[in-house]
Amino acid sequence: MDWTTYQPHPLLDLMFERVVDIPPELIWSAWTDEEHLKHWFTPKPWRTVECEIQLTPGGIFRTVMRSPEGQDFPSQGCILEVVPNSRLVWTNALEAGFRPSRLSSELPCDSFPFTAVILLEPHQVGTRYRALVKHRDEEGCKKHGAMGFHEGWGTALDQLVDYMKGLDPAARIP
Amino acid sequence: MDWTTYQPHPLLDLMFERVVDIPPELIWSAWTDEEHLKHWFTPKPWRTVECEIQLTPGGIFRTVMRSPEGQDFPSQGCILEVVPNSRLVWTNALEAGFRPSRLSSELPCDSFPFTAVILLEPHQVGTRYRALVKHRDEEGCKKHGAMGFHEGWGTALDQLVDYMKGLDPAARIP
């Protein structure tokens, strides 16, 4: 896919964009290293307690988020595109191995099918970060927006940047 | 995905396998050239009257099949993996551009979500041809089997081989 010219659909897509002051390589590492991801992926006081990533098309992208009350919310998707330091695409409409998903309406993240596209570009101060989420229909897009898409992805990105800056430089990239 | 070691799921997958006496390059051409595909894809007297293929992950895989009575059945999916002369993977669980699909229960091919994997390997007499179809659930797999999966894919492959053999050699590979 050529995402550089992609125009988000006004009723079906949500897009989060921000410039951050760490390089694309560090953001890529935060997004693709299973240990790193657990430290920032879920806005506190929620936590990500499990993470499994097979970084290849058809590979698994699985997380378990834990609420402050201790309830676990598993989520599983399938990696679609991997371009190191530049682009990561996955969807919950497929399971690992490209099998169509059985989404559970009881899980918040399964309540609408989506494909997420993380786009990283070098920028003079660090990285132009974009997170595009494509939904099946307007209902799913609205629901995701009402769940706090922009706040949630913004807080997670703040956590990502803080976490990566706080790491020993040798530990940042596996 | 490493499909060489993949074991079909007994309740969720259908697999068609046959050795044919034309090389993988000709089968690849038949599967990926929009004009070629229309000539063999649908068991006669059905016809494939439209075909659109963008041969890249995220690209469209769209056909329109016409019944003997003249009714049209459109079908749209998304390409997932392209390995020339070896492997083609697409799914109807996503539309072009990786957006989750709105499947219509009124269209036979949309009545169950699936991912199709065409695997080609050189063989002493030509090609070992495998078509693997992964379904979301047992219900979809049973339905597809009852629709005549094995007969349908067998007849289509016969048509493919006959069509490619009948072509002028210069026209076989675009």
Image (cartoon, coloured by chain):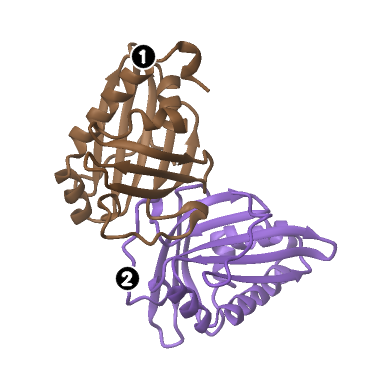
Chain colours: A brown, B purple
Residue B171 visible within the image: no
The nearer-to-camera label among 2 and 1 is 1
Which residue was labeled with disc 1?
A: A165
Q: Where residue B156 sits in the image (x, y, percent)? A: 61, 75
Residue that extends furthest to the right in the rendered view of this protein: B124
The image position of residue A169, as x and y in percent, is 46, 11
In the image, residue B92 sits, relative to residue B64, either above or below, namely above
Q: Is residue B9 above or below residue A145?
A: below
Q: Quadrant of the C terminus of chain B?
A: bottom right
Q: Please count the marks in the image.
A: 2
Q: Is residue A137 above or below residue A40?
A: below
Are circles 2 and 1 on residues that touch, CB within 8 Å? Answer: no
Q: On what subunit does the disc labeled 1 rest?
A: A
In terms of image quadrants, where is residue B21? Answer: bottom right
Q: Mark 2 sits on what residue?
A: B104
Of B151 and B114, the residue lying toward us: B114
Q: CA distance from mark 2 to mark 1?
A: 48 Å
| Whether labels 2 and 1 share one chain | no
Mark 1 closeness class: few <14, some 14–19, many ≥20 residues within 10 Å: some
